[in-house]
Amino acid sequence: MTWLLQNIVGIIGIVVGSFIGYHVYFLSKKLGLKDRLAHKDEIRKRVEPILVEIRKGISSKSELVNVQKYFSHYPNTNERNRYGYTYLGAELKALKFDGVEFFCGVRKVYKNPEGKLTLKSGEGSVKENFNALEAGVIPYEWIEYVDARGDEFSYRPQFFTQFNGADKSPYKYSTYYKESEVYHEGNDPIDMKWRIIEVSK
């Protein structure tokens, strides 16, 4: 009888422990989502006025500061190490649902005879090539702080972010854009100046 009672108590303990663990897990997930959405909202509120000024004609140049190197390297050295660069220049483009988008480079894009676009020049016989703007997205949760004024070294908006992307880049992924052939300067919104293109890497 004692053995049976011990087994019953043990089973009840497992059930209660599982019940508590299940609810603690989902409560933490719920709180985590709420915190992430609040952080996203805070970043968007800081970036929206900068975008308004860019649409009025001020420079879109920004500085991406590596939070892991800020206090140890900034602004004296920008050498790349295992944490990436100390800071990088970029041009603020837009707010997206999953992060902040920046123009970060120009890439040569090649079109093969089948009409597919690629970054690889040796992929089949190249029919034509052109320059495309590369835009990288930094997730909201990677951005820890936005200083719209910048400092005495940059004089431009600074985004203090984790460099968690491939090869210690600040970008989680990249998209490619080509200037629109139907954009009319002065009449169309600046966001319509570039159209997204599908490019294989």
Image (spheres, rainbow, N blue to C red):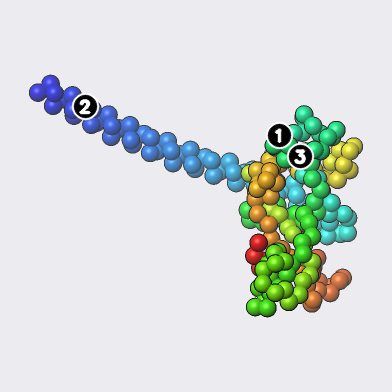
Q: CA distance from mark 1 to mark 3?
A: 12 Å
**Looking at the image, which is closer to me, 83 or 44?**
83
Q: Amino acid at mark 3?
A: Arg
Q: Which residue is tagged 2?
A: 9
Which label's residue is closer to the chain start, 1 or 3? 1
State which mark lies toward you, 1 or 3: 3
Q: Are marks 3 and 2 in contact (CB under 8 Å)?
A: no
What residue appears at the point 18 percent right and 28 percent down from the top-left corner?
Answer: 7
Is any atom of residue 10 visible in this view?
Answer: yes
Of residues 118 and 61, the one nearer the viewer is 118
| Mark 2 or mark 1, earlier in chain | 2
Which residue type carries mark 1?
Gln
Q: Secondary structure at mark 3?
A: loop
Label 3 sits on residue: 80
Farthest residue, direction left: 1
Residue neighbourhood size for the residue with mark 3, other residues' Cα within 10 Å, grouped as few (<14), some (14–19), many (≥20): few
Which residue matches tag 1?
68
Question: What type is the residue that disc 2 sits on?
Answer: Val
* Closer-to-camera residue (200/136): 200
Furthest toward the top, the residue is 2
Q: Is residue 187 above or below residue 54?
A: below
> Relative to residue 101, is residue 108 depicted above or below?
below
Q: From the viewer's perspective, is 41 left or right of 7?
A: right
Task: Please tell me which residue is depicted at 83% across the width and 60% down the height of the picture.
Answer: 55
Question: Which element type, helix, strand or loop, lies under badge 2?
Answer: helix
Residue 108's x, y, as percent?
Answer: 77, 64
Q: Position of residue 52 (x, y in %)?
A: 81, 56
Q: Residue 200 in the image: state x and y as whole percent.
A: 64, 65
